[in-house]
Image (spheres, rainbow, N blue to C red):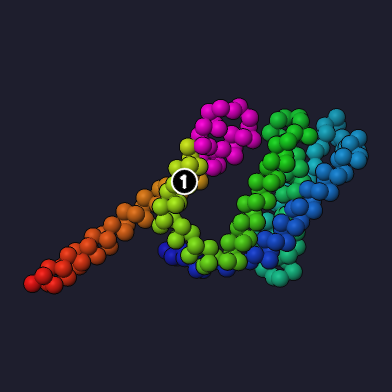
Amino acid sequence: MIAISVRSFQPRAHLATIALSAFISSFIVARTFTTFFPSTVLISNGIHVHHFWYGIVLLAIGGWLGISYSGRETDRVAAILYGAGGGLIVDEVGLLLTFGNYWTGLTYTFVVILLSLVTILILFNRYRELIMTELAEFASSRVSLYIGVFLAAVSVAFIMQTNNFSAMAISSGLTIVGVIIIVTYLIRHVKRMPERNSRNERGKTKMEVGLR
């Protein structure tokens, strides 16, 4: 079996940035076109062909190029097609979730969350070591435990008080984050207990030797 290590992966943040730029541009173009030309649609045999289908095709082509071929220009083209396809799909994600309401606010909520996650991933690829060091220090502090408990408690309260899909989705995400922070702190705390006990034993030994 081939061992897979995190170090064997080579982050390519420039391609992620290209795909993200294509995604944003595609979304803006699709939303602008639909706003100014709402009656311009493709109808075949009485069926309205929505543009998320074109997005699926672009995703498939971009993914196929990225998997099947390797090269600087090919990778860039694949990233552009993949991002553009994602933009066309996300432009109609509200319509897909509500089965008909294209202008629902769910679309914008989804876009904001998705862009935030992708931006975080790009920054993580660029500053991985610094971020990991900072997160390790944060996870070991009691402040992280307090923040985790606060997030989990407040988010659960919001989930119980609302029926709004967007609010529930955001609150659920924050609840998961809070639980992860709490569990991470407890795990690191338990792992460090033997080290602390060892230090205490050495301290007691030195005190006893000093008294003698």
Q: Which residue is mark 1?
A: 148
Few, some or many residues within 10 Å of mark 1 (<14, 14–19, 20+): many
Residue closer to the observer: 179 or 69: 179
The question of residue 159 being in magenta is answered with yes
Percent of width and height locating residue 144: 45, 51
Q: What's the residue type where badge 1 is placed? A: Gly
Residue closer to the observer: 73 or 47: 73
Helix, strand or loop: magenta stretch = helix
Q: What span is in magenta?
A: 154-176
Percent of width and height locating residue 40: 91, 38
The question of residue 98 being in magenta is answered with no
Does the image show residue 93? no
Residue under the image location 44 percent in, 47 percent down? 146
Percent of width and height locating residue 29: 84, 49
Q: Is residue 200 above or below residue 159?
A: below
Q: Is residue 120 above or below residue 109?
A: below
Does the image show residue 140? yes
